[in-house]
Image (cartoon, rainbow, N blue to C red):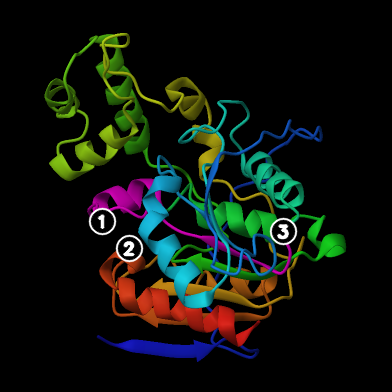
Amino acid sequence: MTLLRFTLRPPFVRGPVARLPTRRLISTSTPRVVDLDFATQVPPNGNTKDGALVILHGLLGSKRNFTSLAKMFMKNLNIPVYSLDLRNHGTSPHVEPMTYPAMANDVIHFLRTHSLSNITLLGHSMYVPVLNMLLVVFNEYTRGGKVAMSVALHPSQSEEQTLSRLIVADVAPTRAVLSSEFKTYLDGMKRVEALELRTRKEAMAALEDYAPDPMLRQFLLTNLNPLTQSEPYAKFRVPLDTLSAAIPEIGWFPYAPGERSWTRPTLFIKGSQSSYINKHSLEPMESFFPNLELETLDAGHWVHGDRPLEFKKLVEDFIQKHS
């Protein structure tokens, strides 16, 4: 295992920044916030508020993806850990719009409602053993990392200052166009529902034309509701129409470099075999997060899956260093 460690401080090598899409018109109205469902790990001292670690999943993930990791963080750091279901995921409410400002407002509402302080916000890619193909399609565009960055850059954080540390796994604050494959997968999931299938095996077969890789299909099916006597047909817990309508927003990021910055300690964890953080994304990263550190693990895009122990250590060392 190779661990490369360096801290970005100006000056550093800068490459040309990929041209961002033209700014789109966004409604100035504030989206309605929702109460997010969550799971909590509380340390033996009973502390539920100070120094909390809040974990955000990626697209089509849920708080359940982080149960083992959350328990380890709670035990080793002796802090409360909250794993959230973002809107339209897990057991949180289904509501539009599904934009980064809306999701960030939900998270900020959660932090306020639970009176959390001295918070570390950790935005992951999906914490499941899936292939890089899946990670390319989903995690490059919508993930807990982009929501976490949106929270840190939210204007409220300039005043409240309850967020103390930010950790982002292998994604940059950039804008991109969502792959057409994502729509194909959603179409396959809609097809599963339309066929009124009664078994998971049938659902796996129905998805094959839309998602040929079996591991990808298994991941998509983690979002199936349990099949019961009262609900015998395969149905997904995520609102497929809402996700489909959100495709234009999913590749977006709510701020352009120079608009906002967050100056508190920020850790980006990059996979050395991944190109999602590269020389072209370093400049906008530093613009948004001037007090950033960049750690590189000998891993692909799924850094926490390829190197779970090393990833855990980086997170724990960073939180302890800046506590």
**Residue 61 falls in image quadrant:** top left
Give the numbered dot on residue 132: 1
**Residue 80 falls in image quadrant:** bottom right
Indicate the position of residue 124 as horizontal and vertical percent values: 46, 59
User: Nearer the observer, disc 3 or disc 2?
Assistant: 3
Choose between 59 and 83: the one closer to the eye.
83
Question: CA separation, marks 1 and 3?
Answer: 35 Å
Label whose residue precedes the other's in the sequence (1 or 3): 3
Q: Secondary structure at mark 2?
A: loop
Label whose residue precedes the other's in the sequence (1 or 2): 1
Q: Is residue 317 visible?
A: yes
Mark 3 neighbour density, 10 Å: few (under 14) some (14–19) many (20 or more) = some
Quadrant assignment for the N terminus: bottom left
Q: Which residue is mark 3?
A: 116
Mark 1 neighbour density, 10 Å: few (under 14) some (14–19) many (20 or more) = some
Check the image and name the residue furthest to the right.
159
Q: Secondary structure at mark 3?
A: loop
Question: CA separation, marks 1 and 2?
Answer: 8 Å
**Residue 42 falls in image quadrant:** bottom right
Amino acid under disc 1: Asn
Q: Secondary structure at mark 1?
A: helix
Q: Residue at x 21, y 38 (%)?
A: 218
The magenta stretch is 117-139
Amino acid under disc 2: Trp
Indicate the position of residue 107 as horizontal and vertical percent values: 66, 47
Q: Which residue is mark 2?
A: 302
Indicate the position of residue 293 as horizontal and vertical percent values: 56, 82
Question: CA separation, marks 3 and 2?
Answer: 29 Å
Amino acid under disc 3: Leu
Give the numbered dot on residue 219: none
Is 281 placed above or below 133 here? Answer: below
User: Nearer the observer, disc 1 or disc 2?
Assistant: 2
